[in-house]
Amino acid sequence: MTTREKILQATLNNQPAASALPDISVFKGEDKDLVQKYMTVFKTIGGNCFLVDDVAGIQSLITQNYDATRRIVTTVAELSDKFELISNEADPHSYENIEVAIIKAHFSVAENGAVWLTEEVMGQRIIPYICQHLAVIVQADTIVPTLHEAYEKIGAGEYGFGAFIGGPSKTADIEQALVLGAHGPLTMTVFIMK
Amino acid sequence: MSQTKTKDHAAMARAFIKDEERVDWHDGALWYIREKRDLAAKQIPEWEQLRETASMIKNNVISNLHDYLLQFEANLTKNGVVVHWADSAEEHNEIVYSILKAKEINQMVKSKSMLTEECHLNEYLEERGIEVINSDLGEYIQQIDQEPPSHIVLPCIHKRKEEIGELFHEHLGTEKGLSDPTLLTRVARKHLRNIFLTRRGALTGVNFAVAETGEYVVCTNEGNADMGAHLSEVQIASMGLEKIIPQKKHLGIFLRLLARSATGQPITIYSSHYKKPRKGQEMHLILVDAGRTRQLGRPDFRDSLKCIKCGGCMNTCPVYRKSGGLSYQNTISGPIGAILAPNLDMKKHADLPYASTLCGSCSNVCPVKINIHEQLYKWRQEIVKEGYAPTTKTLGMKTMAWTLSSPEKLSTAGKAGRWFLHNVPFVVNNKLNPWYRQRDMPEGPKESFAEWFTKNSVKK
Amino acid sequence: MTVGLFIPCYVDQFYPSAAKATLELLQKLGVDVVYPLNQTCCGQPMANSGFEYLSQDCNDLFIKNFSSFDYIVGPSASCILHIKEHLHADKNEEQATNIRTKVYELVEFLTDVLKIEKLDAVFPHKVGLHHSCHGLRGLHLSQMSELNAPPFSKPQHLLNMVSGLEQIKLDRLDECCGFGGAFCVSEEAVSVKMGKDRVKDHTKNGAEYITSSDLSCLMHLEGILHRNKSSVKIIHIAEILNATR
């Protein structure tokens, strides 16, 4: 008997009588003031948040707020004349020195501040983690109230890798003192496009 | 693999409590997290319904685990992930070693995984010439201090910043006396970034594994799991069988509960959904039993497999807060550890179900509603039944039960009052009765209630 | 209505005044109380240590003493909870089941069965209420701080009826005191540390008395108070509810 068979057999022998799955469709968030709610939550978890009208607004905020002499990368086509476009062919290690990454999220979640990103919008899986500063664009009308609507929206969602990211990386491992910027970005900024 | 311990939980706890200033700090820090958890929970009107639903989903998982495992395996394979099965810690370690060996990898970075701690993977690989570095800051600190984690979410919560500063001075060459958490974190960030960039192999734990899609979710705040995984050629995930959930939409339930229960955050900063390997990358997943199917077969204790490792029961447990995680001498400490450990080695961990007042706070914070305190009570019965209670205790209990079984026996045991003075609080008479070490007993009243009542009712 | 008065062994021996107060209070409220003299123990000390199988004689005795009453009332949440959850009998399980449904801790008997809305008690002191875990999380005498559920407190409701009494606010509403049965000696260091910290919460918030519906917690806290020569006293809730000027 292989280990696999042995484990499966033991599982079958030892598991209790079948118990039904609950209906989770009852869980729904309130579809109200989502932009405001999102911004409040995201700021509480240590993020920066701006309401912008268009891509041009984002571009100027980026140049104002970050060191434009450093490497700034993006997957957003409209920003490609100003910033470097991320190649999905390059060795991920080659992004070691990026200062800012600008990515467009599929949507974001009001109750927890997280944005949903898949690897196509990241350009490369490593990008939102390895950059010093992460900037994410969210379309205002895509914000959902809770994770329940979020997973409904993701649906079957064919992706190799996807992530909810809700704020700059953080740790409180030393004496519970909150430090922003553990291994991932030191800051995270969300631009909400009206 | 029964090992003997030289000190039990009570002795380890006594040593921890000697430094009262540290205990007060430890207690306060964890209580603060419990308060943050309460605030987060109370912001969600449907909180209790979420807990109930999560519990029901997990009940469904443990009752259909066989089929879900097959479904998960099939989807992993379809997604291009190599699936391995490990019956024991040793087999798990051998699999990790063989995967790395095949790619001639001798350095690996590992994010937080209690399972690999439980398997003593680092020691196993190091003996075979493979260096492992823990990338979670708390786990990294514990690793350089050669100590296991004392808390599943906050691995070095028992350490003061000055001690961590000293470790950094010794291992990372920081200035002596540097203890500022931000500065120390920056040093670790720089050091570990270089590790991430140079490691070809990365191992992560798994928070949730979705049977329906074959994807698995890893939750971190630091981003360390992803830094390791996305820069690696070979990515390994180790998971206990019980981490399965049926469908992707169920993640909505569990991710809403997990971070709020753990730290009071609305969600961990990163909830990464791994499904397929990156181009040119290998992805392996190891399904580990190591006692889990045995626990599944114990009707009184199988619910412990519902645990989502939030650490909420530790933060709320007054015994944990006052005694520190290391006093449990098990990878998973605190209340949940005390109901998981006896399944792994009942003799070695016979002390743990007794390291509780059965106050029940753990069961109330548990996001999947495990009846932890009831299981502690049941483990006590089991341990006694299996003969792991000390002989003196058994004899004492038998005497007490006999004495208390009838009023006549109680009075022949000596004048009732005297018997009680020696036997309350419920131990065999002993001049060294620990009660008296820091406490007095009540002054015996002139007469017992029964004596007063008899006199009075005769008078009437 | 006839109530069988259950006075746990250690209350009988060490805290007869609480037992007397319970008896007097119930009689004052017009209840017909019978006290069976042949009582010993509920069996919890054995069971909580893992020796539930040794507690059968105690169970049988309890059934013999109490099966004939309409209600069984005792001034100890912990012992009552033990009976409620663990009283069984091979020979007459039916009687055991019956007892488990009609056994009440004093506070819940007053609020849930007698439904009293006023008392003529007077106790002009600052009082800290200690929730025993078995009373709180076992018998649900009050809402548990961990849950997202509407607050209520049966003991507080009763204390509010006592004139002159001022309830102090605690930093930690319902933390365990560390008594825990045999835990108080097998884990002496942790037990005492927990007790000291509970005592500190009460004393720093100005309590003159610490009260509870469980004397086991109070015995532990009293032991610590006494050893540290504190002037703060412990008192069973029955004694407050029965206090007159």
Image (spheres, coloured by chain):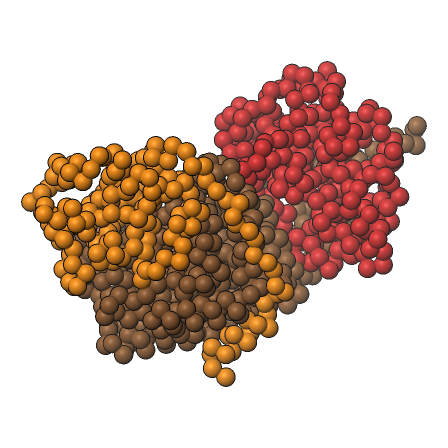
In the displayed structure, B329 sits above or below B40; it is below
Tell me, yes or no, if residue B140 can be seen here. no
According to the rendering, which colour does chain C have? red
Which residue appears at 77% of the width and 46% of the height?
C100
Given residues B392 and C161, the one toward you in this image is: C161
Q: What x and y, as percent, mark residue B201? A: 26, 68
Which residue is most to the bottom?
Answer: A1
> Which chain is depicted orange?
A
Which residue appears at 42% of the width and 43% of the height?
A146
Which residue appears at 44% of the width and 57% of the height?
B248
Which residue is most to the left?
Answer: A69
Q: What x and y, as percent, mark residue C69? A: 87, 40
> Which chain is depicted brown?
B
Question: Which quadrant is home to the C terminus of chain B?
Answer: top right
Decide if residue C65 is on the left or right side of residue C238. right
Q: What x and y, as percent, mark residue A183? A: 25, 52
Tell me, yes or no, if residue B45 can be seen here. yes
Given residues B232 and C212, the one toward you in this image is: B232
Examine the image and state in which quarter residue B124 appears.
bottom left
Which residue appears at 56% of the width and 56% of the height?
A21
Decide if residue B208 is on the left or right side of residue A136. right
Given residues A119 and C91, the one toward you in this image is: A119
Given residues A35 and A10, the one toward you in this image is: A35
In the displayed structure, C144 sits above or below B164; it is above
Q: What x and y, as percent, mark residue C2? A: 87, 35
